[in-house]
Amino acid sequence: MTAVAHPAVVRTRRLPVLRRWLGDGWRGLIGWAVGIAAVVFVYLPLYPSMRSPELIGLIDSLPPELVRTLGYENLTSGSGYVQATFFGLIGFVLIAIAAIAWGAAFTGGAEESGRLELTLAHGVGRVPYTLESALALLLKLAVLGIVAWLLIWAVDPAAELDLDPGNLTAAIAAWVGLGLIAGTAAFAAGAVTGRRSWGIAVGAGVAVVGYVLQAVANNSDELDGLRVFSPFHWAYGQTPLSDGADWPGLGLLWGGSALLVAIATAALARRDIVG
Amino acid sequence: MTLAIHTRALHKRYGSHTALHGLDLSVQTGSVFGLIGPNGAGKTTTLRLLLDIIRPTSGEITVLGRSPRTDGAALRRRIGFVPGELRLEGRVRGRALLRHLAEISGPVAPGTIEQLAERLGLDLSRPVRTLSKGNKQKLGLVQAFMHRPDLLVLDEPTSGLDPLVQREFLAMVREARDAGQTVLLSSHVLSEIQQAADEVAVLADGRVVADGPVSALRIASVRRLRATVTDVAAETVREALGRVPGVEDIDVAAAGDLVRVAATARGDIDPVIRAVTLGTVRDLTVEEPDLEESVLDLYARNGASS
């Protein structure tokens, strides 16, 4: 500190909780954005070399269950490739981990660290606290979505992906929605239990079980019905990157997330703050 | 006079454990009220109930004429609170954290945060997680006092503070009272309450076992005394101490020229000191033990008389 700022009245401001989550968390957000950039720049430019007959032959020789589980059936189109490598795999893992970590930290983590008690002892209600925190989660994930959209669009010409910008937007909305539902599950579990570890466990459960259910369903006609329970299927079942927005799927993801935030709000408003 | 805090038949149960058994508490507006009692007596539970951090199992609470449960945020803007176990984590710097809290509970007058920090000797530019326990506690005090709330609820506010800062804190409490603010503070150190408070309630086991003006409560009776004396026989000191009523745990041992004396005094301290000064005093400490003993003593006496 070289200069002492002239002191001024500190007045109440709108959305103080949201401001603090964003203000405290910008380093982490940049870190996640850099991670996404690394994945996009490493994987997507490989697409032209993936179209070789040798690679198509290689994939044909793999067990079909493995190919379906990885989502590699459609690797030879640009949208299929981006879906399989980014949205369906590493991008999914990245946004799920980021969302779960944030969601669990905003409720259970804040309560365990004593931050919630100190904040709620001031002039903010439980409901505004929860809603502002949920909004912070949404905004941070939306930033990752915008970053991913811009990066993918930036490599599109050089990587010869030939993506449609509208379909890319639809896929990003599904991807962010998928992160959001895992993150709000962590958020709600943290709000109900007051424990960060429970938040992480439930959020990770939603992400992993969602993935496994659709993978199992892809490999078994009898278990095909399981996919309706999979957020992963809600996001990608109708291949938005190739075929455009899947409104019912998006509705389930975003509506489900809103429901989880409502559960978190009701839970936190009703119980004692422990920790 | 109006009441800043009033509770009636306040119960709080955690599962099968009952923390408060029908607590009745009245704090006059503009007074400094001390809540004392041993650890686990229900002090922290009581204070957290006032802030609506936890909710009562049954009973009524009125704070500044309002209900903590229904008037939540607007009411808490008029309260400054130091939690009993203040934990501060993260990279956020003291200044930024205080600013954040001021944006919730403001307005905070220009320079108030800086003045309070300087007064307590707190560095606002350090990340809060690197602060020592005492410095975290100072930050806790700043955030409670900064918006000049009508009511200060302070849970063990001096824990971790060194004696000089404790004195500064007591001055802040007096100034708050002079400015018309009401202060409710809890402590397990009796002398602190005696110095700061006008009225006091003694809690034990979730109940008020005694209350009234601080001057009327005679519970400052247990002291531990240790002394090293010379030029006197150990036997003389032992006999002199033995004649003083209320002196227990007498341990007098000669070690060469020195006589080491240890005793617990309940009641008047003067005859105890006189017994020790039969010799030449080389070293003397008189300690106030943890309040637990005094309060349990009081509790036992109250229980016996009623």
Image: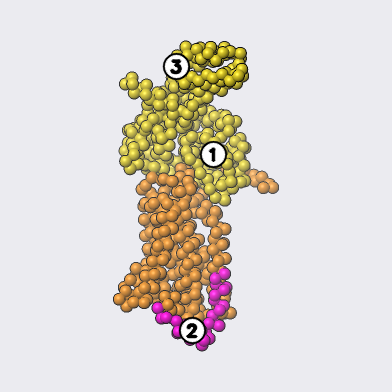
Chain colours: A orange, B yellow
Residue name at image x 57 percent, y 69 percent: A38
Using the image, name the chain to which the residue with label 2 belongs.
A
Residue B146 seen in render: no
The residue where tag 3 is placed is B246
Q: Callout 3: residue from which chain?
A: B
Q: Is residue A235 above or below residue A266?
A: below
Measuring from the top left, give residue B263's x and y in whole percent: 50, 20
Q: Nearer the viewer, mark 1 or mark 2?
A: 2
The residues colored magenta run: A38-65
- Indicate the amino acid at tag 2: Leu
Which residue position is annotated with label 2? Answer: A58
Residue type, numbered disc 3: Gly
In the picture, the disc for residue A83 is: none
Q: Quadrant of the N terminus of chain B?
A: top left
* Alpha-carbon span between mark 1 and mark 2: 65 Å
Q: Position of residue B40 (x, y in %)?
A: 41, 35
Determine the residue positioned at 47% across, 21% down.
B249
Residue A8 figure quarter? top right
The residue carrying pointer 2 sits among few (fewer than 14), some (14 to 19) or many (20 or more) residues within 10 Å by Cα, namely few
- The residue positioned 41% from the left and 50% from the top of the image is A194
Q: Position of residue B24 (x, y in %)?
A: 35, 30
| Residue farthest toward the bottom in the current orientation of the protein | A53
Q: Which one is nearer the viewer's eye here, B245 or B46?
A: B245
Q: What residue did someone put label 1 on?
A: B137
A178 vs B222, nearest the viewer: B222
Look at 42% across and 52% down and name the residue there: A195
